[in-house]
Amino acid sequence: MRILLATSNDHKLQEVREILEPLGVPVDGLDSLDTTYTEPVEDADTFEGNAKLKAVGYAKATGIRCMADDSGLSVDALNGKPGVYSARFAGVGETRDERDKANNDLLLEMLVEVPANKRTARFVCAICVADPDGTILAESTGTFEGVIGFTPVGENGFGYDPLLFVPIANKTSAQMSPDEKNAQSHRGDAVRKITSLLSP
């Protein structure tokens, strides 16, 4: 079972490959295609809705079974924000690294008056797998619980990883090794669930 992961995010592609390829499921990224396809508009108000839009849109366009995810950070003190807007929260930055820094800076600014015990948050990842005829084969959602720190810590990962402190690990997501993170993370959880749903 070969799957096309419908993402232009190299970090996501690497994480999904690290989880699925040891299970014998090869994963191709959009960069493996000869043609460039227009990305479906992600205008749903839930992670699950956006994952479905991307999976079905790319599967129909490419003629290949597609897996898509939509993921982000949900902060309790901000009523679930940044949520589906996580990647474009601050709305500035030309590169992914610039956008990540701006998003992290804005999040810390919005939480500046919030004490440690009120900074609970979680990463959420919704995954959908669709066939070229639009049939949805499987859907799953995973979460990764933590607390938003006061300063970024750690060099691994991407996005909000340096800010999500994971109490059970006593470190931030960005301080975890890839294997450690994949074993606990929202994306690892969702990918393993989807794999079991797709197994014969």
Image (cartoon, grey):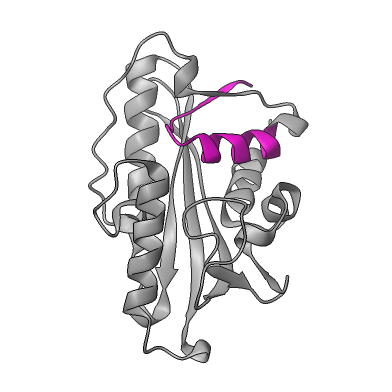
Q: Foreground: 14 or 21?
A: 14
Q: Foreground: 75 or 130?
A: 75
Q: Which quarter of the figure has residue 15?
A: top right
Q: Residue at x 27, y 59 (%)?
A: 90
Q: Residue 163 in the image: state x and y as whole percent.
A: 52, 68
Q: Which residue is drawn at 70% across and 48% down?
A: 178
Q: Which residue is drawn at 60% across and 35% down?
A: 14
Q: Residue at x 37, y 70 (%)?
A: 107
Instruction: Say above or below: 131 vs 74.
Output: above
Q: Residue 168 in the image: state x and y as whole percent.
A: 72, 74
State left or right for residue 10 relative to residue 89: right
In the rendered view of the protein, which quadrant contains the C terminus? top right
Q: Can residue 54 be seen from the camera position used here? A: yes
State left or right for residue 16 relative to residue 178: left
Q: Please identify the residue farthest to the top as the structure is shown.
A: 34
Q: Residue 185 in the image: state x and y as whole percent.
A: 62, 57
Q: How many labels does the image show?
A: 0
Q: Foreground: 83 or 2?
A: 83
Q: Which quarter of the figure has residue 59?
A: top left
In the rendered view of the protein, which quadrant contains the N terminus? top right
| Range of residues picked out in magenta | 1-20
Q: Can residue 79 be seen from the camera position used here? A: no
State left or right for residue 21 relative to residue 117: right
Q: Residue 8 in the image: state x and y as whole percent.
A: 42, 32
Asked if the stretch drawn in magenta spans residue 5, the answer is yes
Asked if the stretch drawn in magenta spans residue 86, the answer is no
